[in-house]
Amino acid sequence: MMNSLRYLLILILLTSFSAYSQQNTGTISGTVKTKEGNNLHYVSLLLEGANLGSTTNSLGVFTIDNVPTGTYKLIVSRIGYQTIKQEVTVTAGATSEVNLNLSEKNTRLNEIQVRGKREWVSESLNKIDVPLKYLPITANTVSKQLMVQRGVDDLGEAVKSTPGVRPINRYGGFQTFHIRGFNNFVLLTDGVRDERHNISTSAPSTNLANVERIEVLKGPASVLFGHSALGGVINIVRNQPSPVFTADFSAAYGSFNTRRLQAGAGGPINSKWSYRVDFGLSESDGFRDYGTNTNNFYAAVQYRPRDGEILDIRMGLNKDTYDTDTGLPVLENGSLVPGMNINNRYNDPQDFLNHTRYDFQVRYVKQLSKSTKISNQLSYYWDDIDYFSTEELTFNATQDSLTRSFPFYFNHRTKPLQNQLELTHDFSIGNIEQKLLVGYSISLMDRKTYRGDIFGEGKFTTVAVQNPILNQGYIDHRDTRYQAKLENVHGIYVQDWLNIGNHLKALIGLRYDIFNGTYFDDEVDVSRNVISEGEKTNIPSQALTYRAGLVYEPIEQFSIFSGYSTYFKPSRRITGDGQVFDPETGFQAEIGSRYYLSTYLTMTLSGFYLRKNNIVENLGGGVFRQVGSADSKGVEIEVNASPLDGFTINAGYAYTDISIREFEGDATNPLAGNRIAYAPDHLANFWANYEIPKGLLRGFGISAGLYHTGKNFTAANNTYALPAYTILDGSIFYNFGKGEIRLNINNITDQIYFRDAIYGNQFFPGLTRNYLLTIRYRL
């Protein structure tokens, strides 16, 4: 009740504020189009000297309210287009109509323009100011606009709009991703590595209230980002400070008592400082009583003392809680036992997953000359994951009850300090233009994982399959030890992009990493004081990785690219007799093409082959050998189109053939030829959005989409399989000036499906039909 009153109060205050207007003011409104007459969205408009401004919506329309009377210069700008200044006179109580056309710049830009959607790769992911069309890589973008249309507030749900990415959410709130079949990936936040996924493969992520877009780079990316990126890189790009005041607010309510509240604002502090602040609250009782509560706060300031110099300071905080979920045990054919209700959850009510995180980033950029730039990015985060769950569920002989056979507890505390120093220099040798990048990175990570004893009469209890009584008595844990991982990594890298004439581009890169890890277990008392120190094991390793590729552009609208890149992942495994292993290695070979039809259509097609080598295998009898390997090959296609004003289409498809290879040497691999777990052969996504651009029904619209996941196995033995499924989603909406109201309906056909699993046979059912009603307003 209190939460509902809080949401209502904020909404009333916002409405009252927007209704207030000063006397002797007027309004400026109009449209911005290309020279060809196409609508331009995300155009920035700023009134010189007034600290007032706006941005265009998806139809190219803008409005600036409460402008004091007088004559102004309206500055109109958009990445990839010529900036113009237009004189406009504001009259009290009247609306000044301004309709403008922008011309494209005749220069290379770090953005690809598609009417209805922005597709770009940011410099934090790309590292150099070169458009994607001139790079021999495959990259995809999930825009804020698309996330809003789909009504998603979760990283896993958001990347379903990217072909070839299989999101996984299990145990309640742990997220991981298979990219091109492999779950070796690197997660970045504004270009900074999140080391948690490289150690535990999965970790919680908070809501998306402060996210501007999500970028996905496919294939090995060790040259720029270091170890462990085989399938690819996911980069979360957060909102940036703005020189123009903007503010936005949204409130949502939906199925399972889902409540969301988001608000953000940004703008100038003075002529040199600007800011951005966002917060988001997301609560839900959850399908099957699997509840979530995420709270996310973000603040950033930017200082521009002079042209060519930027200081960027960012801080994020989230405090989230999740009810744990261990799924539903199924029979070997994948079906539920008779009488089991898909809505039941068998976890103990005392289970929990808590996640708290603070992160800080400071980035300084200095343009030393017209052709040379230096940047330094320092970052630190403190991440705490506290987890306790009755994980494994075991049937009794008659299959009418379940034993909670494996209660599990841990507390991860991860504290990495990272720094990236980079120098870029543009130069020419003869007619060959070049962009050279030289960098040095260092990462110092301290991670402690506390573990302990689990006790109480609620341990190893049994619950009925039908009408279960979940609380079976007190259960708790006490700390007895911690596992420490102290790692430092130094990386030196160089990359050169070459423009060889009008039709040919090349990219080459090289990196050398020096990795050193120290690992030990210490015994602790209940207050976490060390009472016995364990033996330390040091694992040093070095690796040389590289990248090379070509782009051939026979005509401006069409290009062909090919590339080869390598990967490594340091080994952290220590056997009982103290044996350690060399890093995993791998590579990708890729060929693809891109097609552009003006601003109406972009299409990317790629084929790839990925290999992962040096996998440590347990051969039985306590014998471990580094003889395993697996390979993945497939094709991906992505299409972004806007055939009509107000009509956008985002679609993708990926086919992946991934399997385990025979062991090297004389050992026999009984799993050879089996598919890697959670790597479906087919993945497809589609989303279409149409907003009526003019007439009496202007602003009304409809969206529709689907998501398809092919059959995939839950373990390397390929015994249990998650059946293929296709989910249909849609929405209806109305845009009214600066506001929008949207109703999303997901799983329209109310299909029963299983999205993930643990322990091979404990399947997680997907959401039944559900809705979300959202009201959004911006200033």
Image (cartoon, rainbow, N blue to C red):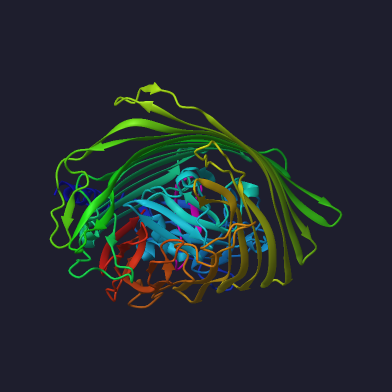
**Left or right for 485, reference 393:** right
The answer to whether 157 is drawn above or below residue 223 in the figure is below
Task: Give residue 30's quadrant in the image.
Answer: bottom left
Q: Is residue 553 visible?
A: yes
Residue, x 73% and y 68% (percent of image)?
Answer: 552
Residue, x 37% and y 62% (percent of image)?
Answer: 756
Q: Residue furthest front?
A: 621
The answer to whether 262 is drawn above or below residue 369 in the figure is below
Q: Is residue 101 visible?
A: no
Q: Is residue 35 magenta?
A: no
**Residue 187 coordinates in the image, percent (x, y):** 50, 49
Q: Which residues are magenta?
A: 42-62
Is 608 in front, or is 597? 608
**Residue 270 coordinates in the image, percent (x, y):** 48, 37
**Residue 737 coordinates in the image, percent (x, y):** 35, 63
**Left or right for 724, reference 515:** left
**Left or right for 576, reference 749:** right
Q: Residue furthest right?
A: 430
